[in-house]
Amino acid sequence: MLGSHEQPLRELDRRVAQAEAQYAAALETLSAARIDAELDGALISSIRVIDRPSLPIEPLGLGVAARTAFGFVAGLVLAVAALLLLQFNDSRQRFQRSGDAA
């Protein structure tokens, strides 16, 4: 019964879904435009600039020498930790000398 009308029905459903998606996108754009207009009119007029922004004269944070020293010390600590971990995880059998007590 629907065999001959099935193809046009699918086409109409596809067009409806496409139109709904376009409507949702247009509605979202309209909403964003209204919000922008309200911000431009209401909030921006109530903002005062107290001090002009400026770039810092000297960079913040640690200097190159301090970062290098920190990296060196951290590398040493990690190397010692790795050696200790390998030493304690060593599961090889240790051979005892003939004079050692078991």
Image (cartoon, helix red, strand yellow):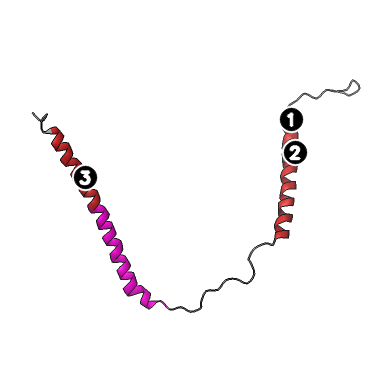
Mark 3 / mark 2, whichever is N-terminal: 3
Name the element at disc 3: helix
Q: Which mark is residue 90?
A: 1
Q: Residue at x 28, y 66 (%)?
A: 34
Closer-to-camera residue (20/42): 20
Classify mark 2: helix, strand or loop. Answer: helix
For disc 2, the marked residue is: 84
C-alpha gap between disc 3 and disc 2:
65 Å
Instruction: Please report whichever mark, 1 or 2, sits nearer to the chain's N-terminal start.
Output: 2
- Amino acid at circle 2: Leu
**Disc 1 versus disc 2: distance between alpha carbons?**
10 Å
Q: Give whichever of discs 3 and 1 has the lower sequence position.
A: 3
Which residue is at the far right?
99
Q: Tell me what residue is drawn at x 89 percent, y 24 percent.
A: 100
Name the amino acid, label 1.
Answer: Asp
Q: Is residue 7 left or right of residue 82?
A: left
Q: Is residue 27 magenta?
A: yes
Callout 3, which amino acid?
Ala
Q: Residue 82: which disc?
A: none
Task: Tell me residue 4's x, y (percent).
Answer: 10, 30
Q: Is residue 26 above or below residue 92?
A: below
> Along the horizontal axis of the image, is 71 left or right of 6?
right
Instruction: Please determine whether, in this image, residue 13 is positioned above or below residue 23.
Output: above
Q: Which residues are magenta?
A: 23-47
Residue 86 image point, x, y percent: 73, 34
The reply to whether discs 1 and 2 touch (Cβ–Cβ < 8 Å) is no
Q: Which residue is mark 3?
A: 17
